[in-house]
């Protein structure tokens, strides 16, 4: 093993927990203990050197609490945790352990502090007192290993989200750790960024024998791991290889999780009567099995395919009814943007080359559910802030119901009531002492009477599924999912005609994500307001949106029906996006010669397409 001075390049990163318990103590306003929450409950685990471990679990199960123990951000209430044979309770080991176990957090922007990339990567080494000549050698090696050495002298602000996360990982790698912990480190990245980060850490795991611990809500990311554990209420409730875990669909559902779409598709087809083998979790394996079934004699193949078609007939009728309803919606333009441009640095000599949004024209119609997608830094957030008047366009026009929003007579305050904005972590918008007061804050600021404000508040709480038993408690005492619903209710209570949702499901486990979107779809149907969803999940976009806007480098690349936009697979991948997994499967089957005529964007649509291909 290579050495630098007297240091090992990479040390033994074996982690061992024995009966690990950690309790959070909640205190009341007087400082007295009000509640004790056991976040980790009798955790015993051994993580071998060089292992790639994925940790899954619903929100609040203890994943992040466990991760924070690994580099001494927290220490055990009971039990023992060793990192490289060092007891984390011993404060004399804290600095050594933090060298051994580096953590990469969710938001790349919160971890970047340097003005150029090499300064940021060197920051940790400087704080450790490493000699100058060694610092720059380590920085160069780390950047090279992550494939970002060409950005060494670039500003981090000019990098994509995935590249920024690589810079954060390079900063950890330069400190020569034995273990890298990624706590939802891909949650805010576009599809290409997620792939770049995961492939980079997999490469470090293979070539440098660095232990990788990946905490994620993206089930497909667990495929990169050697082993997977599932946590629930502070305990480890499942453990095994990704294949062993993802073949237990019903058991995962109990813990608010789900299998990847390929596994769900294969399992549901088998339930419907397709004689597929069990344990399929990856696309290649699924396609091979489908090819095998297609070789079965036509008569036998028709029998199980027709049986499956009948089982799905009811769902097919429901889909057609929903499509018919959407086709009949009223096309009333609410918001119109005409050749809108905006730049943040208006003093720059390159003013016209640094547009955050450039020459964008689009409209939002009453009653539609549309999506805005684009790679990190493509201009999505800037465009949203222009839509509701938080930013003023440098060029172009914006009209709300035919009125120019920049006219002196036009009220931007009223515009912001009509275009409701739900931020990425909606619960951060909460601040009042009770749920009702928090939701009523907006209506009261609209100048409504107390009675009218109450009526709109109670209506919004009902729409979001918040019961009366929660009305008078503090919003901060709610679960994560309940907080998100209350925050959305606060926007709904102002009776917006357009609701903008900026990554509303960020950080949610699969079940909570489904529940949130079901609620949003119900609200959309009942209120007929326009909904604009910003998301990095192509599956969410495919499931809920009718029309898709695609941003690239501040420009509007596409504005079309969902089916049309997802037909441009190569172009989407070039700009850091992708097509839904179901679409990719069906496209590959067509390339393999299957007689598939219809397109598919969701699991349900893929099932119909596959069944139809088997019937002759």
Image (cartoon, rainbow, N blue to C red):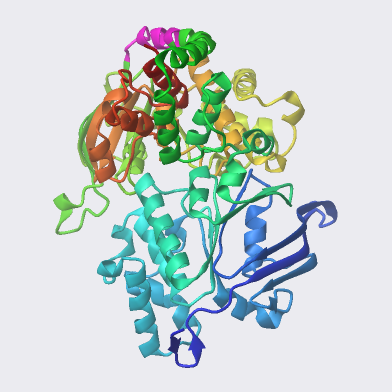
Q: Residue at x 52, y 35 (%)?
A: 263
Which sits in the foreground, 224 or 355? 224
Indicate the position of residue 598 as horizontal and vertical percent values: 33, 18
Rendered position, 600 above or below 302? below
Q: Is residue 456 magenta?
A: no
Rendered position, 372 above or below 462? below
Rendered position, 208 above or below 441? below
> Does residue 352 appear to the left or right of 294 in the view shown?
left
Quarter of the rendering occupied by the C terminus: top left
Q: Residue furthest bottom?
A: 6
> Does residue 453 appear to the left or right of 600 in the view shown?
right
Q: Residue at x 64, y 41 (%)?
A: 480
Asked where in the image residue 164 lies, by quadrant, the reply is bottom left
Indicate the position of residue 489 as horizontal and vertical percent values: 58, 28
For the record, the magenta segment spans 320-332
Q: Is residue 325 magenta?
A: yes
> Does residue 420 appear to the left or right of 513 in the view shown?
left
Q: Is residue 569 visible?
A: yes
Indicate the position of residue 72 as horizontal and vertical percent values: 65, 70
Q: Main secondary structure of the magenta part?
A: helix
Asked where in the image residue 385 lies, by quadrant, the reply is top left
């Amino acid at each position: 093993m290579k050495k630098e001075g007297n240091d090992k390049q990479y040390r033994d990163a074996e982690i061992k927990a024995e009966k690990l318990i950690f309790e959070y103590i909640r205190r009341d306003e007087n400082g007295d203990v009000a509640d004790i929450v056991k976040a980790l409950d009798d955790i015993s685990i051994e993580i071998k050197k060089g292992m790639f471990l994925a940790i899954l679990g619903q929100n609040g199960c203890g994943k992040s609490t466990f991760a924070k123990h690994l580099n001494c951000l927290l220490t055990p209430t009971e039990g023992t945790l060793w990192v490289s044979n060092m007891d984390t309770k011993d404060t004399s080991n804290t600095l050594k352990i933090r060298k051994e176990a580096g953590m990469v957090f969710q938001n790349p922007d919160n971890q970047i502090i340097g003005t150029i990339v090499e300064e940021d990567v060197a920051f940790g080494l400087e704080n450790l007192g490493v000699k100058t000549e060694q610092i720059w050698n380590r920085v160069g090696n780390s950047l090279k290993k992550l494939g970002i050495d060409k950005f060494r002298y670039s500003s981090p602000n000019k990098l994509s989200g995935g590249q920024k996360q690589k810079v954060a990982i390079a900063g950890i790698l330069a400190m020569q750790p034995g273990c890298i912990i990624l706590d939802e480190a891909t949650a805010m990245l576009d599809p290409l960024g997620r792939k770049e980060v995961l492939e980079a850490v997999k490469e470090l795991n293979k070539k440098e024998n660095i232990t990788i611990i990946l905490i994620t809500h993206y089930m497909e990311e667990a495929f990169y791991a050697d082993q997977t554990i599932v946590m629930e209420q502070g305990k480890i409730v499942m453990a095994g290889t990704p294949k062993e875990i993802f073949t237990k669909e019903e058991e995962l559902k109990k813990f608010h999780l789900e299998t990847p779409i390929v596994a769900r598709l294969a399992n549901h087809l088998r339930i419907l009567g397709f004689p597929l083998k069990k344990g399929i979790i990856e696309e290649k394996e699924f396609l091979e099995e489908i090819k095998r079934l297609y070789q079965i004699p036509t008569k036998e193949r028709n029998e199980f395919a027709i049986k499956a078609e009948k089982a799905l007939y009811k769902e097919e009728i429901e889909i057609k009814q929903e499509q018919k309803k959407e086709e009949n919606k009223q096309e009333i333009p609410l918001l119109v943007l005409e050749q809108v441009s905006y730049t943040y640095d208006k003093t720059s000599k390159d003013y016209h080359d640094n547009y955050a949004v450039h020459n964008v024209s689009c409209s939002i119609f009453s009653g539609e559910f549309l999506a805005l997608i684009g790679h990190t830094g493509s201009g999505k957030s800037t465009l949203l802030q222009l839509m509701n008047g938080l930013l003023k366009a440098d060029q172009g026009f914006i009209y709300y119901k035919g009125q120019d929003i920049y006219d002196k007579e036009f009220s931007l305050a009223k515009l912001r009531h009509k275009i409701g904005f739900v931020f990425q972590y909606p619960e951060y918008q909460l601040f009042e002492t009770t749920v009702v007061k928090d939701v009523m804050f907006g209506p009261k600021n609209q100048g409504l009477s107390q009675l009218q404000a109450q009526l709109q508040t109670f209506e919004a709480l009902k729409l979001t599924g918040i019961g009366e038993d929660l009305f008078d408690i503090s919003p901060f005492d709610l679960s994560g999912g309940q907080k998100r619903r209350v925050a959305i209710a606060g926007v709904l209570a102002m009776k917006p005609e357009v609701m903008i949702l900026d990554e509303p499901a960020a950080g949610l486990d699969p079940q909570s994500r489904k529940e949130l979107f079901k609620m949003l779809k119900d609200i959309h149907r009942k209120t007929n307001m326009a909904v604009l969803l910003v998301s990095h999940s192509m599956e969410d976009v495919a499931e809920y949106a009718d029309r898709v806007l695609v941003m690239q480098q501040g420009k509007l690349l596409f504005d079309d029906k969902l089916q049309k936009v997802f037909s441009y697979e190569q172009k989407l991948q070039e700009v850091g996006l992708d097509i839904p997994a179901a679409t990719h499967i069906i496209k590959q089957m067509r390339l393999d010669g299957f007689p598939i005529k219809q397109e598919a964007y969701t699991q349900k649509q893929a099932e119909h397409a596959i069944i139809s291909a088997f019937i002759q």
